Amino acid sequence: MTESTKKHYDVYDSDLPLCCPLPRLALWDQHPRVYIPIRPGDEAVCPYCGTTFTLKEKQ
């Protein structure tokens, strides 16, 4: 599975504000960027592609 086809990502404070697709992904085959609200410990889902994000605390 490549980074751009994963359907779940753990994200951290450094990734905020959260947007999908993530800046580290190749954008040529992705949907328009959308910003997604998320709280620590919660999950959020992209309305375009269904990718799930979990906001984690740094270990």
Image (cartoon, helix red, strand yellow):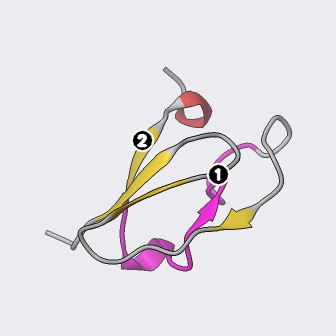
Q: Quadrant of the C terminus?
A: bottom left
SS state under label 1: loop
Q: Where residue 8 is drawn, which disc sits there?
A: 2
Q: Position of residue 55 (x, y in %)?
A: 33, 66
Seen at 42% across and 41% down, the residue is: 8
Seen at 48% across and 72% down, the residue is: 15
Around disc 1, counting alpha carbons within 10 Å, would you say few (fewer than 14), some (14 to 19), or many (20 or more)?
A: few
Q: Residue 57 occupies which quadrant of the picture?
A: bottom left
Q: Is residue 7 left or right of residue 59?
A: right
Give the vertical position of 14 relative to 9 (above or below).
Answer: below
Q: Position of residue 36 (x, y in %)?
A: 58, 69
Q: Is residue 32 left or right of residue 24?
A: right
Judged from this view, the residue extending furthest toward the left is 59
Q: Position of residue 19 (x, y in %)?
A: 63, 65
Seen at 54% across and 26% down, the residue is: 2
Q: Residue 4 occupies which quadrant of the picture?
A: top right
In front: label 2 or label 1: 1
SS state under label 2: strand
Q: Where residue 13 is drawn, which disc sits there?
A: none
Comes first in the chain, label 2 or label 1: 2
Q: Residue 13 occupies which quadrant of the picture?
A: bottom left
**Magenta stretch: helix, strand or loop mostly:** loop
Residue flagged by tag 2: what amino acid is it?
His
Label 1: which residue? 47
What range is drawn magenta here? Answer: 11-26
Q: Position of residue 9 (x, y in %)?
A: 41, 48
Give the vertical position of 40 relative to 25 (above or below).
Answer: below
Q: Is residue 25 one of those drawn in magenta? A: yes
